[in-house]
Amino acid sequence: MLRYSYLPSDFNPIVLMLGDAEDLRRLGAALRFFAAEPGEKSFDEFDFAQSDAGTRIVIRPAMKQVGMRRPAEDSPLEWLLSPDQAREFADQLDGLAAPDCRSGSEMLGPDAVNVREGIPVKVSRGEFHDRFLVTER
């Protein structure tokens, strides 16, 4: 199961996504589908992903600016992507999901936060234990 969470910070907020090879392939497939047919898609609809109760992400087609944004405290994060960018990120996930890759990470978005580019998205495989980002109930 792909686990994801928004980790707020005054200086370095980040969206962290953790999963195994199959999770990353499925996320890559979802990004390719978005690239082929751009439209709003909520991570809540992905049967391969789970988050803490406070993190909601919606992928939307980029009109001008791209990147992950938090429009308001109570609203979902918006991941604004162009079709080309979605395909590029899917290709990065393919590399991370390759059978010969046991662990690693990719940044899907800016390496540093600024007003123009948004919140960084880090996807990781094999770098965190399976219970990390899982909320106990």
Image (spheres, helix red, strand yellow):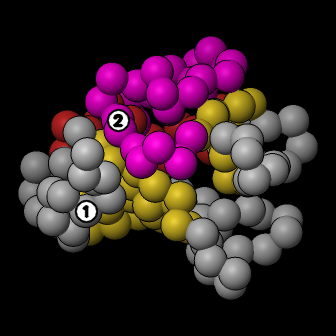
Query: Residue at horizontal 66%, vertical 46%?
Result: 77
* As drawn, 21 above or below 118: above
Helix, strand or loop at label 2? It is strand
Kind of residue at badge 2: Ala
Q: Is 77 on the left-hand or right-hand side of 51?
A: right
The tag earlier along the polypeptide, 1 or 2, is: 2
Q: Quadrant of the C terminus?
A: top left
Which percent across, then down, holds residue 114?
A: 79, 74
Residue 42 counted in the magenta span = yes
Q: Quadrant of the N terminus?
A: top left
Kind of residue at badge 1: Phe
Return the residue at label 2: 49
Query: Is residue 39 in view?
Result: yes
Which is nearer the eye, 79 or 38? Answer: 79
Which is nearer the eye, 127 or 4? Answer: 4
Q: In the rendering, which numbered label is found on residue 132?
A: 1
The residue furthest right is 64
Residue 9 counted in the magenta span = no
Q: What's drawn in magenta, residue-wise?
A: 28-56
Which percent across, then down, holds residue 94?
A: 31, 45
